[in-house]
Amino acid sequence: MALLDETQVAEALARLEGWTRTGDEIRRSFELADFKGSVEFVNRLLPVAERMNHHPDLEISWNTVVVKISTHSEGGLTAADFELAGELDALT
């Protein structure tokens, strides 16, 4: 999968709400009701990531899950990253 250029990254990011770019990854914090909500969100995320064979990095705290997405094999951002982000947005 080809890396996106800066213009493509900016356009794709503009279509997503709540996502920001940090270097070669995009990230979003999902606020949940409590720790149980955080774990349940991760459990809903799992089948999506498996189906797409694209696995984000996760940070889980009491009521927050931070999702970081990058295509590590390509060394940056690809269309798959933004597709996964959109799929995860639909889980909330």
Image (cartoon, rainbow, N blue to C red):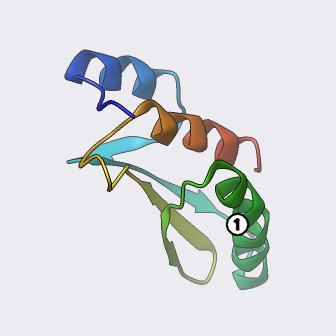
Q: Is residue 45 left or right of residue 23?
A: right
What is the quadrant of the N terminus in the image? Answer: top left
**Residue 8 on image: x %, y %:** 33, 18
Query: Against 34, is 25 above or below?
Result: above
**Residue 89 on image: x %, y %:** 67, 43
For the point 63% across and 62% down, the residue is 31
**Residue 81 on image: x %, y %:** 47, 41
For the point 62% across and 36% down, the residue is 86
The quarter of the displayed image where residue 53 is located: bottom right
The quarter of the displayed image where residue 72 is located: bottom left
Residue type, label 1: Leu
Query: Against 53, is 14 above or below?
Result: above
The quarter of the displayed image where residue 36 is located: bottom right
Q: How many numbered discs, if any?
A: 1
**Residue 37 on image: x %, y %:** 77, 74
Q: Residues within 10 Å of mark 1 (few under 14, many from 20)?
A: some
Query: Against 4, is 82 above or below?
Result: below
For the point 57% across and 35% down, the residue is 83
For the point 38% across and 17% down, the residue is 11
| SS at mark 1 in the image | loop
The residue at which mark 1 appears reads as: 32
